[in-house]
Image: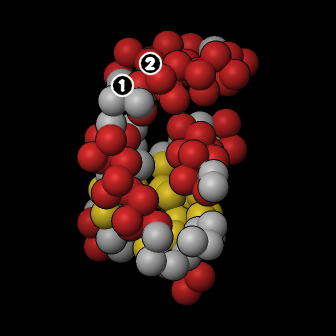
Amino acid sequence: MPVPTIHIKRVYDAPSAGDGARILVDRLWPRGCSKETLKLDLWAKEVAPSNALRQWYHRDLGRYADFRKRYLKELEGQGAALAELRAGVGRGPATLLTASKTPEKSHASVLRELLTKK
């Protein structure tokens, strides 16, 4: 099975033709965004970090390595939600959407890493 092409974008970035399936991976709906603006194919809020982990990490973004480990541990209990997400990205290119100001050091990058592993 080929490795899916997965992009990461902020929810505030405009949709583009190359996005493929657009999947929101935040637990909370992003401020100032309507369903029409986001053009979502899936809202995978179950795979977002718990509120406690999200708040812990938000206090110090320098803890990314620890956040990544804790988040991967949380994801171990999300088999059905991860399967739904895998199905969403498995049909072609996909874009994981997040409101994070630093998507490259967010849960979206951890998800992309997990979903593109062989």
Amino acid beneath label 1 = Ser
Q: Nearer the viewer, residue 23 or 11?
A: 23
Are dots 2 and 1 in contact, CB under 8 Å? yes
Element assignment for label 2: helix
The quarter in which the N terminus is drawn is bottom right
Q: Quadrant of residue 101?
A: top right
Left or right for 49, reference 79: right
Q: Quadrant of residue 16?
A: bottom right
**Rendered image coloring scheme:** secondary structure
The span from disc 2 to disc 1 (Cα, nearest Å) is 5 Å
Question: Which residue is pictured at 30% across the width and 47% down the height?
Answer: 81
Q: Residue furthest bottom?
A: 17
Q: Position of residue 111 (x, y in %)?
A: 54, 45
Element assignment for label 1: loop
Left or right for 27, reference 117: left
Q: Which residue has dot 1 on it?
A: 50
The image shows residue 43, relative to residue 22, as above or below, that is above
Question: Which residue is pictured at 37% across the width and 48% down the height?
Answer: 82
Question: Which residue is pictured at 56% across the width and 14% down the height?
Answer: 59
The image shows residue 17, relative to residue 103, as above or below, that is below
The image shows residue 21, relative to residue 81, as above or below, that is below
Q: Nearer the viewer, residue 56 or 80?
A: 80
Q: Which residue has dot 2 on it?
A: 53
Q: Position of residue 33 (x, y in %)?
A: 35, 58
How busy is the neighbourhood of tag 2: few (under 14 within 10 Å), some, or many (20 plus)?
Answer: some
The quarter in which the C terminus is drawn is bottom right
Instruction: Residue 60: tell me if it is visible.
Output: yes
Residue 23: mark: none
Amino acid beneath label 2 = Leu
Question: Which residue is pictured at 60% across the width and 27% down the height?
Answer: 68
Left or right for 30, reference 95: left
